[in-house]
Image: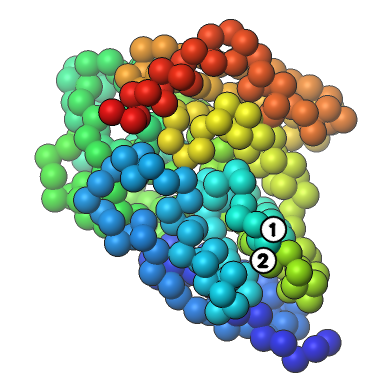
Amino acid sequence: MTKKTIRIGTRDSQLALWQAHTVQKQLQDLGYKTEIIAVKSDGDIMLDKPLYELGITGIFTKTLDIAMINGQVDIAVHSMKDVPTALPKGIVQAAVLERANVLDILVHKGNLDFLEKEGTIATGSLRRQAQWWNKYPNHKVVDLRGNVNTRMQKLKDNDWNGAVFAAAGLERINLKPDSFINLDWMIPAPAQGAMVIVAMENDAFTIDAVSQLNDIETEICTYIERQFLKTLEGGCTAPIGALAKYNEHDDTIDFKGVLLSIDGKQKLEIDKAVDISEWKKLGFNSAQQILDNGGAELMTKIKSELKK
């Protein structure tokens, strides 16, 4: 084995570092030498504006992409739901790790009476906001930005009733409190709970090393979800959720997808099971069905609202 050290690029938040160290350990167990290089991202620095106002998909991944293209790091590890569906030229998906918990959870202050009445919950995600309003139209939703630790602190410091988080992020760094409920009615972000490793297309050594960490079931399910997102042209902005699950006993894939208006009043969803042999077009076909049934007009409306 060559002596090349694989340089792992990561953001410097606790969760990002946890992800990088997880990949580092797996590569070292295979006998590779590695080094972790932390880079600050624009998404971490610009905390004063909601993500969708910045008008950029991939704000958390851009800095690492540039570091890779400039040859400062060999791979980057990301929460896959943060990664734009179109990767920059020269960068490829090298592996998707086995998926963790896919659910969104509501972290609350110990009292859930507000769910029956009026309440205020916090989230920086248009998808979570729209699905929350769809179910609780009389609630107030406030913007919540920052890494997981910052958001947990803001929830403590404010008089909100709760905030929505991805279960996987809190579980990975042992921040999941006792006062939470699973939002199993909320369709997660495409690829939620999955970690992806990207590398330079022409770096055969690194791609060969990293591809050994790939989990094929997670790769297929996240491919379907991201294809659904890409076909609806969501980028990271429109309220779009998608979840694909593989069923071993009958070799099928269950797929749920949703597109909502920003205020949550309009909801277009799809729920179907197909044979595993049809997985390659499942995301595309499901998105086409939604686009043909009012989704195209809704996407136009969302885009014009986000431009305001």
Give the percent coordinates (x, y) of residue 300: 46, 19
Q: Quadrant of residue 276?
A: top right
Q: Nearer the viewer, residue 199 or 143?
A: 199
The quadrant of the image that shows the C terminus is top left
Numbered circle sitting on residue 92: 1
Q: Quadrant of residue 305?
A: top left
Graded by Cα atoms within 10 Å as few (under 14), some (14 to 19) or many (20 or more), the crowding at tag 2 reads: many
Seen at 60% across and 43% down, the residue is 85
Seen at 36% across and 18% down, the residue is 264
Seen at 43% across and 35% down, the residue is 237
Give the percent coordinates (x, y) of residue 134: 36, 17
Q: CA distance from mark 1 to mark 2?
A: 6 Å
Q: Is residue 140 above or below residue 19?
A: above
Q: Secondary structure at mark 1?
A: strand
Image position of 265 (left or right of 109): right
Q: Amino acid at mark 1?
A: Val
Q: Is residue 8 above or below residue 84?
A: below
Q: Is residue 59 above or below residue 45?
A: above
| Residue bearing the label numbered 2 | 199
Image position of 54 (left or right of 184): left
Task: Point out the tag, 1 or 2, that comes first from the N-terminus.
Answer: 1
Give the percent coordinates (x, y) of residue 30: 76, 77
The quadrant of the image that shows the N terminus is bottom right
Graded by Cα atoms within 10 Å as few (under 14), some (14 to 19) or many (20 or more), the crowding at tag 1 reads: some
Confirm whether residue 97 shows in the render.
Answer: no
Do the numbered discs 1 and 2 sit on residues whose CB atoms are within 8 Å? Answer: yes
Q: Nearer the viewer, residue 258 or 249?
A: 258
Q: Amino acid at mark 2?
A: Ala
Q: Secondary structure at mark 2?
A: strand
